């Protein structure tokens, strides 16, 4: 085994192996379970850091072996995979801390953390997949490992949400498989190639087939990416515990769908081929419709987590919209939003979990004056909400700035209009939450009886993660020009995938 093969395997198994051990631990073995979880998370971060340094210097890490003739399992790291895997590693570390505090006295903790760890392994496997076949394997592994997390509470509502989740995601996986099989017959094994090129040897006369395959792949990945009308599972899945909601919305399931779409556009078809086939404009229109529809549906929700869920439906399609516009600036906006949306949305779900677990608050109309009772939690939520509204200097402003530039660069002024309307709608459904939390007078008997003793507004394990992620959402905006910022990494990827000849 060479050095280039070791880091991908360590990253993959640093969560998978602890997860297998955790399944067999009694719930009472909290110390050992926590040690395994945190050791795996730290090891993953260390190896991701080493790989980032190597990829920045032009190194490539790869593991490949043949399963059957013509079908290869490939783990491969490039700049795009490192963007996604860095988000996964950092947010898994923080979500693990949060989940340990959240489930401190809950039943079935070993079952939860076992599947939680395998879910993260599937996500990192998706990030490092070097071809479409490998990505599909981990994509399905993600479906089956997240289902037990969605139904963890075991209530009728949770079981119903799990059934709906499986119906959507298994159907999406079957559609991806159909596209994979058809494309393999047409073009042979499909490896991910920077600036496209995987289809360069496909001769003329196959345009209709390539368009149909594109539709299948985008439709299959679009289920997890929550593109309208394939988004119905996401709000229903909000019955899951807060750490699961954070995982679903910020790093695992929805990001896996968006990442799959990015791979199809940039590394299978390539911008030039996709533009030649005329498939990007319809996808941009679908993304725009999803952005507006998700925001309008968010306006109608009084349950806090459901409002955040429809916000995810809207916000995630910024990635798809940017990838569909023909321009380097839009590409940068799409790629950087992978990180920016992740840190902002995970902050919001952490904060929603804090309100629910500490004060029993689930609805927006129950949040009157809660900012005075939980100023740090609501301060973190406020920063994330301002970022979602694209208020400078938050990270969300950087995203929409580049998407707006990309729309003008591509001569797609209508897309700029969609972004402006979306920002207004974001303000319309977030500002009332902030006003209620900070300025309304609390109603007697709503949550005052939940006041805990001590100087902390909630447990430290629940408070630390949202403060860190809210700080990142601010720092990624303030220091967007730093060589170490997500914007700089997205610019590098755009140069490799799009700008470079």
Image (cartoon, helix red, strand yellow):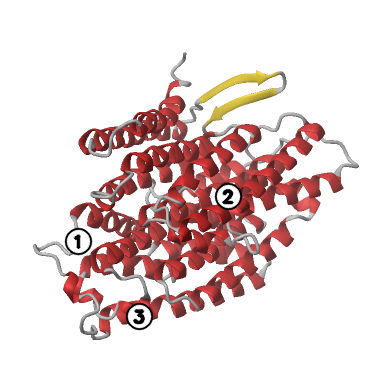
| Residue beneath the point at 35% across and 80% down | 365
In this rendering, which labeled residue sits more in front, label 3 or label 2? 2
**Above or below for 451 versus 475:** below
Q: Which residue is mark 1?
A: 458
* The one of 429 and 270 positioned closer to us in this rendering: 429
- Secondary structure under tag 2 reads helix
Query: Mark 3 highlights which residue?
Result: 365
Name the N-terminal-most of marks 3 and 1: 3
**Residue 376 horizontal side relative to residue 489, left or right:** left
Q: Looking at the image, can residue 316 be seen? A: yes
Q: Residue 487: in sight, yes or no?
A: no
Pointer 2 with pointer 1, Cβ within 8 A: no
Q: Secondary structure at mark 1?
A: loop
Q: Tally the marks.
A: 3
Q: Is residue 436 above or below residue 125?
A: below
Q: Secondary structure at mark 3?
A: helix
């Amino acid at each position: 085994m060479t050095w280039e093969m070791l880091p991908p395997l360590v990253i993959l198994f640093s969560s998978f192996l602890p997860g297998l051990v955790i399944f067999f631990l009694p719930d009472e073995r909290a110390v050992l379970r926590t040690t395994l979880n945190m050791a795996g998370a730290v090891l993953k971060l260390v190896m991701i850091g080493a790989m980032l340094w190597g990829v920045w210097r032009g190194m490539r890490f790869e593991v490949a072996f043949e399963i059957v003739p013509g079908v290869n399992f490939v783990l491969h790291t490039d700049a795009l995979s490192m963007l996604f895997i860095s988000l996964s590693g950092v947010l898994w570390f923080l979500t693990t801390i949060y989940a340990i505090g959240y489930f401190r006295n809950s039943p079935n903790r070993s079952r939860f953390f076992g599947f939680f760890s395998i879910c993260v392994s599937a996500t990192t496997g998706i990030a490092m997949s070097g071809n479409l076949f490998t990505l599909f394997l981990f994509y399905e592994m993600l479906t089956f490992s997240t289902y037990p997390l969605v139904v963890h509470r075991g209530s009728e509502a949770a079981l119903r949400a799990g059934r709906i989740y499986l119906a959507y995601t298994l159907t999406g996986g079957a559609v991806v498989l159909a596209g994979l099989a058809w494309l393999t017959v047409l073009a042979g094994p499909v490896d991910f190639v920077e600036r496209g090129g995987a289809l360069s040897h496909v001769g003329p006369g196959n345009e209709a087939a390539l368009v149909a395959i594109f539709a299948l792949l985008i439709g299959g990945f679009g289920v997890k990416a929550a593109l309208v009308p394939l988004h119905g599972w996401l709000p229903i899945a909000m019955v899951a515990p807060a750490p699961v909601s954070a995982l679903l919305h910020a790093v695992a399931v929805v990001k896996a769908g968006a990442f799959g779409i990015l791979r199809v556009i940039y590394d299978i078809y390539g911008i030039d081929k996709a533009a030649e086939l005329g498939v990007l404009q319809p996808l941009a229109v679908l993304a725009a419709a999803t952005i507006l529809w998700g925001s309008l549906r968010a306006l109608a929700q009084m349950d806090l987590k459901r409002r955040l869920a429809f916000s995810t439906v809207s916000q995630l399609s910024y990635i798809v919209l940017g990838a569909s516009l023909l321009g380097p600036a839009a590409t940068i906006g799409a790629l950087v939003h992978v990180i920016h949306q992740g840190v902002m949305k995970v902050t919001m779900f952490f904060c929603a979990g804090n309100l629910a677990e500490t004060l029993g608050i689930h609805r927006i109309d129950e949040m009157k004056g809660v900012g005075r009772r939980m100023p740090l939690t609501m301060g973190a939520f406020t920063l994330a909400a301002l970022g979602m509204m694209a208020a400078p200097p938050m990270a969300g402003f950087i995203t929409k700035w580049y998407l707006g530039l990309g729309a003008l660069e591509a001569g797609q002024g209508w897309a700029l209009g969609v972004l402006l309307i979306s920002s207004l709608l974001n303000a319309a459904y977030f500002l009332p939450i902030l006003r209620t939390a900070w300025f309304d007078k609390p109603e007697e008997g709503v949550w005052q009886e939940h006041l805990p003793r001590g100087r902390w507004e909630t447990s430290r394990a629940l408070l630390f993660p949202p403060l860190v992620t809210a700080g990142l959402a601010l720092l990624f905006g303030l220091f967007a020009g730093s060589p170490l910022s997500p914007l700089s990494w997205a610019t590098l990827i755009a140069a490799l995938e799009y700008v470079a000849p």
